[in-house]
Image (cartoon, rainbow, N blue to C red):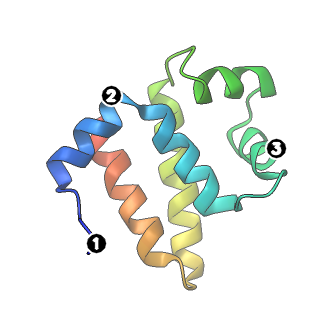
Amino acid sequence: MVHHIGRAMSAELDRRNPYLLLREVGTVLYGTGPDRKDSMVEALKVSDRRYRRWINGEQPIPAGIWDELVALLDQEIGKGGRQVDALRRLRHRIQDLIS
C-alpha cells in the first residue's frame, strides 16, 4: 500500500530539510548519473563547493536559488514530456517552501 504525505506535512519536511528538496529537483531535472551535480552547478551558476555545502546541509540555501529552480522547472514543464506531473509537484513544493 502506498502512503501519500499530505501537502502540509510535505511542506514541513521541506522546511526542515531543504537540501533534500534541492537534491530531488536535481534528480528530476538531470537524472541520477554522475553529471547531475555538474548540471545543477552550471544551471544555477554557482561553484561546486557552494552547491556541495547546500546539499550537505552545511550552508543555508539562499532564497534566490529557489526562484531560479522554479524558473528551471517552468522551462522543463513548457517542453512537455512524461515528467510534467513530477515537475509540477516539485514546483508547488518549492512555492510552499518560499511562501
Image: 29 above or below 99: below
Whole-percent x and y of residue 77?
Answer: 51, 73
Going by the picture, which residue comes out furthest to the bottom?
81
Residue at horizontal 55%, vertical 85%? 82
Residue at horizontal 63%, vertical 61%? 29
Amino acid residing under circle 3: Asp
Q: What element carries label 1?
A: loop
Q: Quadrant of residue 13?
A: top left
Amino acid residing under circle 1: Val
Numbered circle sitting on residue 2:
1
For label 2, the crowd category at 10 Å Cα-Cα, with few meaning under 14, some 14 to 19 and many 20 or more, is: few
Residue at horizontal 53%, vertical 21%? 57
Numbered circle sitting on residue 38:
3
Amino acid residing under circle 2: Arg
Distance in Å between CA atoms under marks 3 and 1: 33 Å
For label 3, the crowd category at 10 Å Cα-Cα, with few meaning under 14, some 14 to 19 and many 20 or more, is: some
Numbered circle sitting on residue 16:
2
Which quadrant of the rendered structure holds the N terminus?
bottom left
Going by the picture, which residue comes out furthest to the front?
1
Image: 76 above or below 66: below
Q: Would residue 98 be found to the left or right of residue 55 on screen?
A: left
Q: Is residue 99 visible?
A: no
Residue in the foreground of this view, choosing between 43 and 23: 23
- Work out whether mark 1 precedes mark 2 in sequence or the reverse, and give the earlier one: 1
Q: Is residue 26 visible?
A: yes
Q: Are marks 2 and 3 in contact (CB under 8 Å)?
A: no
- Work out whether mark 2 precedes mark 3 in sequence or the reverse, and give the earlier one: 2
Residue at horizontal 54%, vertical 76%? 78
Distance in Å between CA atoms under marks 2 and 3: 25 Å
Whole-percent x and y of residue 54?
Answer: 59, 25
For label 1, the crowd category at 10 Å Cα-Cα, with few meaning under 14, some 14 to 19 and many 20 or more, is: few
- Work out whether mark 3 precedes mark 1 in sequence or the reverse, and give the earlier one: 1
